Image (cartoon, rainbow, N blue to C red):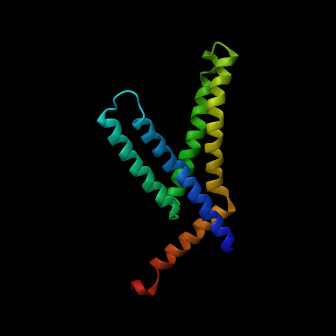
Amino acid sequence: MHATIERGRRITLGIAIWLTVVPLVLRIALLLFSRRPVPAGAWSSAIFSGAISLALGWLLYQGYAWTRLLFVVGLAVIAVVPTARMLMIARDFTTAGQWIAAAAIVIPRDTINLVLALVLWRSPSVVAFFERRNAIATLSLTSPALD
């Protein structure tokens, strides 16, 4: 059982890093290596949104159930909405090549987001990790030492 929980912890850590740290690093790199002058608002926006996403990633890693639900719903929406939008505007594409080019960008990204949402929600290891974290939190809240 301990190996399953440890595996769930590693999966959750990987998802948290993939969804919070990697986009922040890419956004800062984009701002640093931009050829045009970057307005101050772009930096403050990157820092503020990065801090919020890192905090949410940390809370996900700490095993808070509400952050797990937030990430699953967010990933599902991010996976479904662009694909649906692409299908709605597909009639405006003049050639099959335009549709294939758009699908080649949107569908793999959305598939990755949907798979991450499913893993975060349904993986037995991740479920065991969150159950263990929530059991520890509940135990510490109801312990006699706090009375």
Give x and y (percent) for residue 87: 63, 26
Q: Which quadrant is home to the C terminus?
A: bottom left
Quarter of the figure with residue 36: top left
Of the pair 7 and 56, the residue shown nearer to us: 7
Of the pair 56 and 81, the residue shown nearer to us: 56
31 left or right, relative to 136: left
Q: How many marks?
A: 0
Residue at 55% x, 49% y is: 18
Give x and y (percent) for residue 90: 63, 21
147 left or right, relative to 99: left
3 left or right, relative to 26: right
- Against 108, residue 142 (above or below) is below
Of the pair 70 and 42, the residue shown nearer to us: 42
Quarter of the figure with residue 12: bottom right
Q: Which quadrant is home to the N terminus?
A: bottom right
Q: Can you name the residue that lies furthest to the left here?
A: 40
Give x and y (percent) for residue 54: 44, 53
41 left or right, relative to 88: left
- Against 137, residue 89 (above or below) is above
Residue at 47% x, 59% y is: 58
Residue at 65% x, 54% y is: 119
Quarter of the figure with residue 39: top left
- Against 123, residue 112 (above or below) is above
Give x and y (percent) for residue 146: 40, 83
Residue at 65% x, 65% y is: 7
